[in-house]
Amino acid sequence: MEQRLVNLQERIGYRFVRPELLKRALTHRSFGADHNERLEFLGDSVLSLSVSRLLFDRFAGSDEGDLTRVRAHLVREDSLHKAALVLGLPDVIRLSEGEAKAGGAQRASILADALEALLGAMYLDGGTEPANALVQKLFGEMITGTTAESWRKDAKTELQEWLQARRLSVPTYRIAGVRGQAHAQTFDVACDVPALAVTDTGDGRSRRAAEQEAARKVLLQLQALPESTIAARLRD
Amino acid sequence: MEQRLVNLQERIGYRFVRPELLKRALTHRSFGADHNERLEFLGDSVLSLSVSRLLFDRFAGSDEGDLTRVRAHLVREDSLHKAALVLGLPDVIRLSEGEAKAGGAQRASILADALEALLGAMYLDGGTEPANALVQKLFGEMITGTTAESWRKDAKTELQEWLQARRLSVPTYRIAGVRGQAHAQTFDVACDVPALAVTDTGDGRSRRAAEQEAARKVLLQLQALPESTIAARLRD
């Protein structure tokens, strides 16, 4: 085995029983038929489970809404890209000459995908434990000393900032319904962003709590929109 | 342990070392503080990995695009709801009196969430293998005799049907660019659905292939939209 793959295995803390899986994980589609995309499919779920387990254990008192938010943050392309750089993946990724010349070894999407593929290969080769350990090494420090709640901005504030950054007007909130008896009411609130034709509802034991949930759900919708779609909607 | 929990363990093919995890997985938030939402957070990823592994093994020759599509289909709420009914979860879910009277034990979202929580509890108690085995039992038959490709309709047709079902006009396709030399060109095609302000692009070695990919990506965006958002956009 090449020395740099030996070194990579030291960095990830795992020695492959089937080194061909490691090679495949590092092979971009441009390089040849034996590429890493199926491993990336698997690794996407391995990553999600390893991160979920890390957060479940570390943030034992946090509710699933906060855990979900931190998880979404950690599995984002830019977090994976940074982790791939820490592991030195640009030096070991296999690309076509054309893709390499075009700077592919530095492209965030290629590196993030390769990291997922690597986790998929580790899982196939050795089960979930090696992947859990690597994810803990890569992401454990990022969350050390934080709480799940500290990753949460006030959702209404965050939504307003997101819209302001795009010079869009503030969202509107309206009560869509009130359920239950006086001592245990549940409020339904709708949050609308007319400029982008996005709306969603939240409920809660107070109007404010319902607004926060509605804002959070709208924000998740907005964050999932490709920039091209946002641009198209603003053109209309 | 209650007899019906003993029976449930037979149906899922796993006996808990820590039965309190099983109980918690079956406890809806309305019932009390010891509810299943954190287990659902974990189980969501367990489910994804178990389904991914099943598809990775069964569809050994399929590319990750097709695998991703089948996975999305299997982890949808209605698939999980059906599987929860097969396991008899309505008989064992613990709800507040109010929620039970309102028919909560039959609600698709409550049952789907409980199934995810159950998978999360199985993982905490016994690792990934019991969850893999249950997912194989629940979803293995659904995919037996199929290919990953057979879950794929022609994306342009599917998109058109989706739009027609909502009395919306057909999408437009336009070539956004052509890259590469004559013998190895790559086409970039944009697909627009003006009525819903959704757009996306695809690329491929032929115009048709690029159109298919663009249609597929637009369709994924549309399928991710809550009905309330679609309604709001159509109102505008």
Image (spheres, coloured by chain):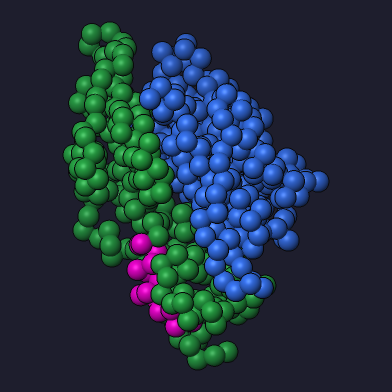
Chain colours: A blue, B green
**Image quadrant in which you'd find residue B169:** top left
Q: Quadrant of the N terminus of chain A?
A: top right
B85 within the magenta span? yes
Judge whether A32 appears above or below A212 on screen: above
Q: Residue at x 21, y 21 (%)?
A: B207
Judge whether B198 appears above or below A120 on screen: above
The secondary structure making up most of the magenta span is helix
- Is residue B178 or residue B107 the one in the foreground? B107
Q: Position of residue B167 (x, y in %)?
A: 21, 43
Q: Position of residue B32 (x, y in %)?
A: 64, 75
Evaluate whether residue B13 shows in this view.
no
- Is residue B115 or residue A193 the one in the foreground? A193
- Is residue B219 or residue B22 the one in the foreground? B219
Evaluate whether residue A157 shows in this view.
yes
Question: How many numbered discs sit on the rendered protein?
Answer: 0
Q: In the image, is B236 to the left or to the right of A22?
A: left
Q: Give the farthest residue toward the right.
A: A145
Q: Residue at x 55, y 33 (%)?
A: A77
Q: Position of residue B95 (x, y in %)?
A: 54, 78
Q: Position of residue B19 (x, y in %)?
A: 60, 80
A122 within the magenta span? no
Per the rendered image, the range of residues in magenta is B78-92
Q: Residue at x 38, y 36 (%)?
A: B236
**Image quadrant in which you'd find residue B177:** top left
